[in-house]
């Protein structure tokens, strides 16, 4: 809503953000799926539609639905509004993965809390997630806070900067084109 258009269609790298992310995920994942509500789906993509029992749970609905759809698989979850994610980001997360925990996630550079939408959620997470949902916890970040999560530091502070408004989009494009850490600095 704040962006005024579908974030997956924005272009930061010469193609839509969706196509960019699908491209960088392919080398690391056997199959890549999109997640969303039924009204968000469109043809020619592998979709996992949010299950009705998780309606109105936002991103958590997608994670729970994916874990239920393929219960013996772990999931690399990646939000579409992260333009600074690169193959290096994904590789770094995979290298530091701890499958003995329910998830491996980066610590936010802003508050040190887990970042659930660029994380590896293990198949073992499903039962703990359902337990916490039954207690009224429907936020993926709060689930990671209340469970055994392996947290890792960001190697690049911009990796998980998300973009929510047209102004942030313009700044992100400028930063990516110029290779700047701070889009307001001059060359």
Image (spheres, rainbow, N blue to C red):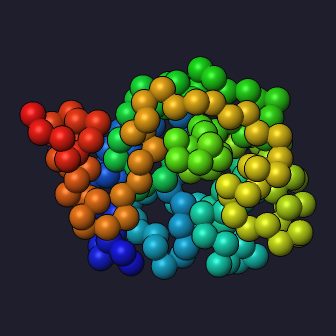
**Residue occupying the point 36% across, 75% down:** 2
Between 29 and 54, the one lying in front of the other is 54
Q: Is residue 163 visible?
A: yes
Residue found at the very far top of the displayed protein: 95
Residue 30 percent across, percent down from the top left: 55, 34
- The mark tally for this picture is 0
Q: Nearer the viewer, residue 63 or 186?
A: 186
Above or below — where is 136 with respect to 159? below
State left or right for residue 185 relative to residue 181.
Answer: left
Q: Quadrant of the C terminus?
A: top left
Q: Is residue 134 above or below residue 101?
A: below
Query: Which of 170/101 is in front?
Result: 170
- Residue 111, position as x, y percentages in the image: 59, 48
Percent across and percent down for residue 172 are 26, 50
One can see residue 115 in this view: no
The quadrant holding residue 158 is top left
Quarter-wise, where is residue 54 in the image?
Answer: bottom right
Kindly give the residue lying farthest to the front in the view shown. 185
Task: Locate the N terminus by quadrant.
Answer: bottom left
Figure quadrant of residue 104: top right
At horizontal 74% and vertical 49% (from top left) the residue drawn is 144
Asked if residue 18 is positioned above or below residue 30 in the image, the reply reads below
Q: Residue at x 83, y 40 (%)?
A: 148
Q: Residue at x 73, y 57 (%)?
A: 142
């Amino acid at each position: 809503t704040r962006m005024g258009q579908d974030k997956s269609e924005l272009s930061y790298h010469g193609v839509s953000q969706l196509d960019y992310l699908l491209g960088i995920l392919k080398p690391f994942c056997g199959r890549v799926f999109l997640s969303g509500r039924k009204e968000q789906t469109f043809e020619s993509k592998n979709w996992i539609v949010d299950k009705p029992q998780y309606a109105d749970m936002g991103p958590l609905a997608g994670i729970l639905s994916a874990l239920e759809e393929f219960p013996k698989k772990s999931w690399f979850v990646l939000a579409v509004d992260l333009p600074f994610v690169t193959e290096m980001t994904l590789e770094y997360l995979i290298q530091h993965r701890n499958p003995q925990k329910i998830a491996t996630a980066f610590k936010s550079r802003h508050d040190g809390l887990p970042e659930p939408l660029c994380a590896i959620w293990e198949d073992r997470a499903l039962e703990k997630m359902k337990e916490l949902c039954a207690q009224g916890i429907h936020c993926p970040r709060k689930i990671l806070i209340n469970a055994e999560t392996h947290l890792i530091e960001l190697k690049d502070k911009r990796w998980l900067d998300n973009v929510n408004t047209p102004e942030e989009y313009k700044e992100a494009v400028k930063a990516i084109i110029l290779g700047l850490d701070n889009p307001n600095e001059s060359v």
